[in-house]
Image (cartoon, rainbow, N blue to C red):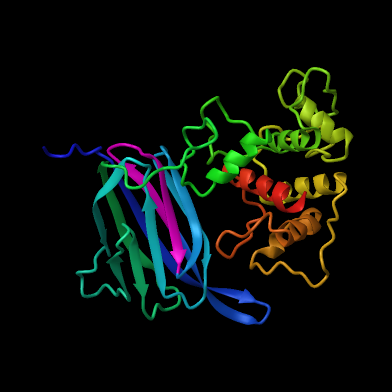
Amino acid sequence: MKKRLLSILLVLVLLVGVASVASATGNQTMTYLGFTVWGHDGLFEGAEITVRADNTVVFQFTTDGSERATWWEGLLPLGLREITIAIDFPDGFVIEERRGGIPGASNPEWHAPYEIEFGPDGSFIININNLSPREDIIADFSWVIVPGETQAPVPPQDHPFTDVRANAWYASAVEFVYNEGIMTGTSPTTFAPNANFSREMVLATQFRMANGRPANASDPRNTPFTDVAQGRWYAPYIAWAFNNGLTTGTSPTTFGTGQAVSRQDFALFMYRFANFSGINTSVPGSFTLNFPDASTIGSWAQDALRWAVYEGLITGTGQLLEPVGTASRAQAATILMRYMQEVQ
């Protein structure tokens, strides 16, 4: 009997360019990576796409049912020779067909200094040869998936979240923070790993770490912040943090509830919490942040980010630090797990 297709085609359009970036030692060329992934004839959740530059993971994305996701942030290693794009579907699905090619490659006027291969694990491999500065790689990739036999046993998960696959890169972190009582789900059965982590969520996790319990009716709720109503779930967490010097808000009268926490603000929250907890936050003077975008760090977050990177709590995305980028709930779970396992 013919297999029933799920009418789902995940398509990835890759664009890689080489751009000149000024450095302290002069000009040098650096390669940036960007792509868009979307579903045709249906949306698919839980497929994890991993991009490697040579042997370095520079990007991971888990489809969440959104029609489209775009990424243009990656700084790839100089002298790049190979890009690998792999996809890992949820258990019970298999790749029936892969399609990959260079748009317009049949046109003799199209210069394509690279080749595309199919890897044995369902991946696409781009071999780069003599890519010139300012020259882009443009390639289309797609996977057609169908129901299939389980390819490998999936270990049990010690949490109730149906949107966290057992082999997702953040699965162990979600399991850890859930079982430690640090983070809860967005519903009894969902964690929303790709959703933004908000400022009040950070303080809720810190309260639970410091007190070993969630807030209750006996905890103070008064703050000077007009955007923190006493009846909201986050009021006692923000009040606790304000009273202990862990936050001053975004202004004297606002906390910034509902705002996604930036990576540098997350570092500052954790830095203050570590000091509050009596942890030594000193960093050797010789330690520097060797990221091309380090100059974009806010002056108020310099010490905090140096400490967070030094302790391994925050790492770069590719070769960028992205201090003003936002942190997802999956990334937050990973940072909190690292703090409890390596710092606390």
Q: Residue 328 location in percent, x, y? A: 59, 43
Q: What residue lies at 47% left-to-right and 32% top-to-bottom?
A: 162
- Front residue of 148 and 139: 148
Left or right of 197, for residue 253: right
Q: Residue 336 location in percent, x, y? A: 68, 45
Q: Residue 242 is drawn in which quadrant? A: top right
Q: Is residue 202 visible?
A: yes
Q: Residue 131 location in percent, x, y? A: 40, 77
Q: What residue lies at 83% left-to-right and 18% top-to-bottom?
A: 218
Q: Quadrant of the N terminus?
A: top left
- Front residue of 22 and 73: 73
Q: What residue lies at 54% left-to-right and 40% top-to-bottom?
A: 193
Above or below — where is 256 with respect to 35?
Answer: above
Residue 65 magenta-highlighted: no
| Dominant secondary-structure state across the stretch colored magenta | strand
- Front residue of 188 and 265: 188
The span picked out in magenta is 35-53
